[in-house]
Image: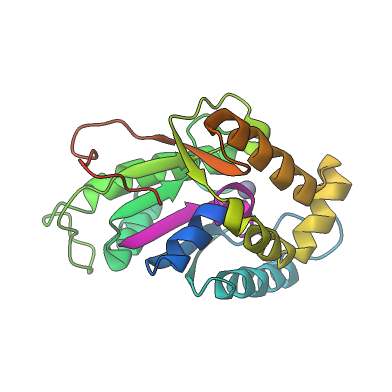
């Protein structure tokens, strides 16, 4: 399978679904990790340009841990909108990735950029199948199933699907640690220990489905996006 995971910022996938991505990769599936935003506003002291460059390196490094492809759409943080140019940008990214399954933010997420990306993925993965919506990249053949990853601390998220990530939690932590700038920022700005959050969330979701550690998802339960076989690993 070709798996496309799309987060708003360079560390979102690591925080919310990296165990599942590591599992996909270990099973031999092709994984593309895309961050829509530059990650240019997530720091107290480092200027935007400098921070974007640091965070791009962190994302590449993290993707490398599981042999995934890393893509950045180059949007400034907190300046992401559902408009035509951004929709086309997302369409081209999806058309190029040719995914069998897409994972992205939940529409119930707390962060405005996350919610915008969730909407853009839903819209663009439909429009990307229309050959007459010409963008310069050939249209996809089918509307891709979309899964929404957990929210931070599971707030307003009632999972319908679980992935056992017990054997991939160490890899998830390694990937998160590639984002050193954010480990520091999240502690300073949100008083959040990310590794603790990853561990507690995985244990809690595991408790719900009878395994030591799990990640949780919901599905975009919409016509043309459903499949007879299970798409999550
Ligand atoms: Zn984010």
Residue, x 18% and y 66% (percent of image)? 138
Residue, x 58% and y 24% (percent of image)? 156
Judging depth in this view, the residue of 5 and 169 nearest the camera is 169
Quarter-of-image position of residue 11: bottom right
Q: Can residue 110 be seen in this view?
A: no
Residue 7 lies in magenta, yes or no? yes
The percent position of residue 36, horizontal first and vertical second, equals 51, 57
Q: Which colour scheme is used?
A: rainbow
Residue, x 57% and y 75% (percent of image)? 64
Would residue 214 appear left or right of 43 to someone viewing this image?
left
The percent position of residue 37, horizontal first and vertical second, equals 56, 57
Would residue 35 appear left or right of 3 to someone viewing this image?
right
Q: Can residue 232 be seen in this view?
A: yes
Residue, x 11% and y 55% (percent of image)? 132
Question: In this view, which residue lies farthest toward the left?
Answer: 132
Q: In this view, does 176 lie above or below 157?
A: below
Quadrant assignment for the N terminus: bottom left
Judging depth in this view, the residue of 209 and 217 nearest the camera is 209
- Count the numbered circles shown: 0
The percent position of residue 202, horizontal first and vertical second, equals 64, 42
The percent position of residue 148, horizontal first and vertical second, equals 45, 39
Q: Give the range drawn in magenta.
A: 1-18
Residue 181 lies in magenta, yes or no? no
Would residue 148 appear left or right of 95 to someone viewing this image?
right
Judging depth in this view, the residue of 19 and 182 nearest the camera is 19
């Amino acid at each position: 399978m070709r798996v496309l995971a799309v987060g708003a910022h360079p560390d979102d996938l690591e925080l919310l679904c990296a165990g599942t991505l590591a599992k996909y990769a270990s099973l031999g599936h092709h994984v593309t990790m895309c961050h829509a935003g530059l990650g240019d506003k997530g720091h107290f002291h480092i200027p935007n340009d400098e921070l974007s460059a640091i965070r791009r390196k962190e994302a590449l490094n993290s993707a490398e841990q599981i042999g995934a492809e890393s893509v950045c759409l180059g949007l400034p943080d907190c300046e992401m909108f559902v408009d035509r140019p951004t929709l086309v940008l997302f369409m081209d990214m999806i058309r190029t990735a040719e995914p069998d399954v897409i994972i992205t933010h939940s529409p119930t997420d707390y962060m405005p950029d996350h919610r915008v990306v969730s909407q853009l993925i839903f819209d663009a993965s439909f429009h990307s199948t229309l050959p007459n919506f010409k963008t310069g990249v050939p249209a996809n053949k089918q509307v891709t199933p979309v899964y929404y990853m957990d929210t931070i601390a599971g707030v307003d998220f009632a999972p319908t699907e679980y992935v056992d990530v017990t054997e991939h939690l160490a890899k998830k932590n390694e990937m998160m640690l590639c984002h050193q700038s954010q480990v520091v920022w999240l502690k300073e700005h949100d008083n959040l220990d990310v590794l603790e959050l990853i561990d507690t969330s995985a244990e809690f979701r595991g408790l719900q489905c009878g395994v030591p550690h799990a990640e949780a998802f919901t599905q975009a339960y919409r016509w043309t996006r459903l499949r007879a076989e299970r798409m999550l690993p």
